[in-house]
Image (spheres, rainbow, N blue to C red):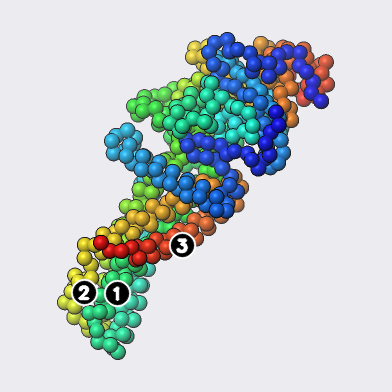
Amino acid sequence: MEPPAASAMPPARFHGLRRTPSSSFSGPVGWLAGAGLAWRSLLECLALYGNIVIGRERLDLPAFTAALRQAGLSILPAVTLVAAALGLILGRQAGTVLESFNFPGVLLFTITYAVVLELVPILVGVLVAGRAGVALAVRHATLVVTGQMDGLLVSGINPIRFVTGPVLLAMVVMSAAFVVWGSLVTVGTAYLWLFLVADVPPYQLIDAVRSTLGPFDVREALAKPFVFAVVIALIATVNGTIAGRDPEAIGEAATRTMIAAVSSILLIDLLFVLWPEA
Amino acid sequence: MVARPASVSASERAAEPAPTGLPALGLSGVFQHVAGHAVLNGVSLSVQAKESVLLIGRNGAGKSLLMRLVLGLDQPSAGQVRLFGEELSRLPSRRARALRRRVGAVLQRGSLLDGLTVLENLLLPLRATRMPRADMARAARLVMTQLQLDGMENHLPRALSVGQRRRVELARALVHRPDLLIWDGLTDGLDLPAVREIFALLRAEMEVRGLTVVATDNVTLEAILPEERVVVLDRGRVLFDGSRSALEAAAPSQLELRYLLQGRW
């Protein structure tokens, strides 16, 4: 029998996932293959959560706790610090503007809206991508490079459910919590500056929050970190899984994940902005 | 040049009807290319249930690659790999998982999860069985005792010696009581007494439960019995397929085999 050429070598298929070298994921077809793997990963995670809810599977609590630590506690100081710095910058600049144009209502409306719906969700997305997303990609890539992925596969374990499942859940929970916390810190710091330095009365600040954030805005503000976290986790999973067996692939997977995650966050945010309001 | 062995060839074996049901493992005309080089050149092999087969050959003969194909970790360029009569790569994921649970594997590179303790590694294959936790732990501890791993439950793999890690890998491969054991690198990290001990355990498993064993090695034939089956792989082809005693009888008269096996028993 004449064997086919090496380039025609089919990838291995396991648990419905194809173990494929990264070269198969290059070019437009590769991009589609990556999107397919991301979609498949999402379905696997949803199936895991569904099974946990109906009691057919158990949540890997140690892995979930570790993921909460990594996606949460480890970046809490950074989120707090950056949010406070952002609030001070906005307060300072707003104070300067108020010296020239006395429209505090419009200015406070703009600041609150921009912070809660745009700046903080994006900021949190970037920080979560940089910490938890990159860690997830590195974890997957390390498993592949060191042969541990093979150990999972031959043990009958689905690596997506095992590795990504707990991390995705932790990222969603912590991202939403960080957006609430980051918004409070940023808006609070900006308003504090305006109250103390620019003499803006407190009732104006409270009115600004009330008039800016309706139920739809709050929903959008909470939906964004949810979507960002899912997208970051899927990008990390795909980049880590297709990394290949070369040790250098671990670093490449981390870099690719960061770039793709930040780009995706901005593009998704644009889609949110352009999406017609009901 | 291929020396024709005195015993039954692999392709002839593969063509034979299975004496009892489907073979545990069936390879048919398997080719594999890696980076443009043909590593496997039409390998055909059939392993019946309850049989033990030692696959030997020099470094680079294609043994590990063949085991990866059997386990579904890679897919062949051409040919078929069947486990219990079914092609793993063509099965839907749920059935593939069910089929996988009938196989235990020890991989040559080592594949224990670094972040998990010995006990947690052993529990991995049992996760999908819906076994109660207490039974899972009991099964893991039993196999740890059998492989002299008592007291290492909470050790991380990096704290173990190479030989201990191999034992843990074997324990993980056996903990869910598979029908087929794939063991790549039989003597890697193990001394001969350890190999003999483990072989005694495997023979007991074969007799009691009908375990099928396919192992690869490039060093020794000492651990196997004269009547057990040996397959010699060289440059991606099956050079010999028969019993150890037939191999010993054939090797002196066949230069290629004698060269391959010089000093190995």
Q: Nearer the viewer, residue B76 or B48?
A: B76
Q: Nearer the viewer, residue B18 or B247?
A: B18
Helix, strand, or loop for circle 3?
helix
Q: Chain of mark 1?
A: A
Q: Chain of mark 3?
A: A
- Would residue A23 be found to the left or right of residue A129 on screen? right
Q: Which residue is mark 1?
A: A111
- State the separation of the CA atoms marked 1 and 2: 9 Å
Q: Chain of mark 2?
A: A
Please, is residue A182 above or below residue A1 in the view?
below
User: Cβ–Cβ below 8 Å for labels 1 and 2?
Assistant: yes
Judged by depth in the image, the label closer to the viewer, 3 or 2, is 3
Amino acid beneath label 2: Ala
Neighbourhood count class around disc 1 (C-alpha, 10 Å): few under 14, some 14–19, many 20 upward: many
Callout 3 and callout 1 share a chain: yes
Neighbourhood count class around disc 3 (C-alpha, 10 Å): few under 14, some 14–19, many 20 upward: few
Q: Which residue is mark 2?
A: A208
Q: Which residue is mark 3?
A: A263
Q: Residue furthest left?
A: A203
Query: Residue at horizontal 47%, vertical 35%?
Result: A15
> Percent position (x, y) of residue B58?
73, 29
Query: Residue at horizontal 73%, vertical 13%?
Result: B7
How many discs mark residues in the rendered view?
A: 3
Q: Quadrant of residue B108?
A: top right
Inspect this view and state whether residue B184 appears.
no
Judged by depth in the image, the label closer to the viewer, 3 or 1, is 3
Q: Earlier in the sequence, mark 1 or mark 2?
A: 1
- State the separation of the CA atoms marked 3 and 1: 24 Å
Helix, strand, or loop for circle 2?
helix
Helix, strand, or loop for circle 1?
helix
Q: Earlier in the sequence, mark 3 or mark 1?
A: 1
